[in-house]
Image (cartoon, helix red, strand yellow):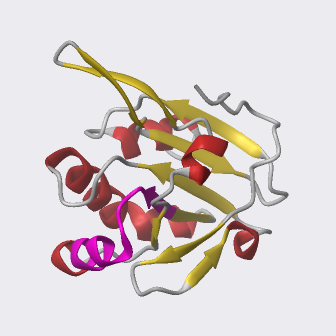
Amino acid sequence: MAERLVQGDAAPDFTLQDAAGNEVRLGDFRGRNTIVYFYPAASTPGCTKQACDFRDSLAALKAVGYEVLGVSPDPVKDLAKFVKEEELTFPLLSDEGHKVAEAYGAWGEKKNYGRTYEGLIRSTIVVDPEGKVALAQYNVRATGHVAKLRRDLKLDK
């Protein structure tokens, strides 16, 4: 299993394709707080709930200086369909080879219904303006995650 990131670590840089096939680099977000969240699969119930929660919270997050990037092992065409169906307003990035998820400690052993397998671990990493990890959360729940993240970041006063 990949080593998990902790506060203060340098966030691994990456370049991935978004739902429109454009390259997006983490470095493009330098100077801003960036929430990088990893989710297992587009258009599944939990991932849809989480993505829509980020979509519905995006204006409030941007108002306090946060950008949002969603990363999954889905191919670009599946991301494009997900973005269109759910009217998502932030970049979803394709990590088909799961190299970025591995670098972030978001790929590893999972258990489901008694079966053990390798897969994406629902995780959220907040990267500060200098490119360092400000917060790392692993095995997060899809439902209520944005509200918990806001509390953990002390954005709700």
Magenta extent = 69-83
Closer-to-camera residue (100/92): 100
Is 7 magenta? The answer is: no
Q: Which residue is drawn at 59% across and 62% down?
A: 64
Is 76 magenta? The answer is: yes
Q: Which residue is drawn at 82% across and 36% down?
A: 8
Q: Residue at x 63, y 30 (%)?
A: 2
- In this rendering, the count of numbered labels is 0
Asked whether, in this view, residue 93 is left or right of residue 145, the answer is right
Where is residue 147 drawn, in percent x and y? 38, 42
Q: In which quarter of the image is residue 135?
A: top right
Where is residue 138 drawn, in percent x and y? 50, 30
Closer-to-camera residue (157/18): 18
Where is residue 70 drawn, in percent x and y? 45, 60
85 versus 116 height, above or below: below
56 versus 89 height, above or below: above
Q: In which quarter of the image is residue 80?
A: bottom left
Asked whether, in this view, residue 1 is left or right of residue 117, the answer is right
Closer-to-camera residue (61/103): 103
Closer-to-camera residue (114/40): 114
Asked whether, in this view, residue 47 is left or right of residue 76, the answer is left
